Image (cartoon, rainbow, N blue to C red):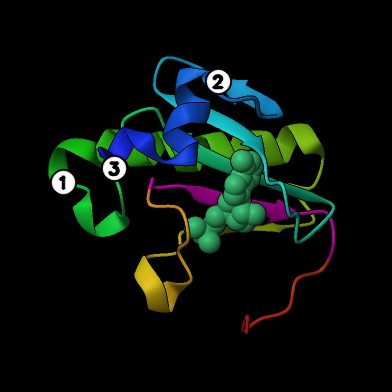
Amino acid sequence: MTDTDTIFGKIARGDIPADIVYEDDEVVAFRDLNPQAPTHVLIIPRKPIPTLNDATEEDAPLIGKLLLAAARLAKEFGFAEDGYRTVVNCNANGGQTVYHLHVHLIGGRPLQWPPG
Ligand code: AMP
C-alpha cells in the first residue's frame, strides 16, 4: 500500500466522489463528511504527503498554497471577517486519522478555544 492509497489520495485522483469546493493542479478542497461547524472543508495537496512531519523545504510553497486556499475559501463562504479556524492534525496524539496531509477549514459559528 502506498501513500496514495488513502481515501484522500483517491479523492484527489477522482477515484471516489467528494463534495469538491475548489481544485487546481496542486490543491483539492472538499467538504468534510462529519462537519464540526456549518462549514467544514478539508484542503489537501494532490501530492500525497502523509503528515506534516513528512513535509520538506521543497513543500513550503505547496503548504503555503493550502493555507492561502483556506483564506480564499473563507472569504467566499462569507465568514472571513467573523473568523474561522484552520487545523492540521499530526499523528495519533494530534487526532490524525487520514494519513494524507490536510488542512481543516472550520467556520460559520463561534469556536471554543482551547479545543478538547
Ligand atoms: P483528521 O482527523 O485530521 O485526520 O481528519 C480526517 C477528516 O476526514 C475527519 O474530519 C473525517 O470526518 C474526514 N473524512 C474521512 N473520510 C472522508 C471522506 N471520504 N470525505 C470527506 N471527509 C472525510
Disc 1, SS? loop
Q: Determine contact: label 3, label 1, CB under 8 Å.
A: no
- Does the magenta portion include 108? yes
Residue at 53% from the left image edge and 18% from the top image edge:
14
Residue 16 as seen in the image, left or right of residue 93: right
The residues bearing labels 2 and 3 have C-alpha atoms spaced at a distance of 17 Å
Residue count near mark 1 (Cα–Cα under 10 Å), binned few <14, some 14–19, many ≥20: few
Mark in front: 2 vs 3: 3
- 40 shown above or below 87: above
Q: Where is residue 72 in the image (x, y as percent from the top left)?
A: 62, 33
* Amino acid type, residue under disc 2 in the picture: Glu
Q: Position of residue 13 (x, y in %)?
A: 45, 20
Closer to the chain start, of discs 2 and 3, is 2
Per the image, the residue denoted by label 3 is 49
Q: Residue 56 carries which label?
A: 1
Span highlighted in magenta in the image = 100-109
Q: Position of residue 67 (x, y in %)?
A: 48, 43
Q: Residue 23 carries which label?
A: 2
Disc 2, SS? strand
The residues bearing labels 3 and 1 have C-alpha atoms spaced at a distance of 10 Å
- Does the magenta portion include 74? no
Please identify the quarter of the rendering in which residue 64 is found: top left
The residues bearing labels 2 and 1 have C-alpha atoms spaced at a distance of 23 Å
The answer to whether residue 113 of the structure is visible from this angle is: yes
Q: Quadrant of the N terminus?
A: top left
Residue 56 as seen in the image, left or right of residue 23: left
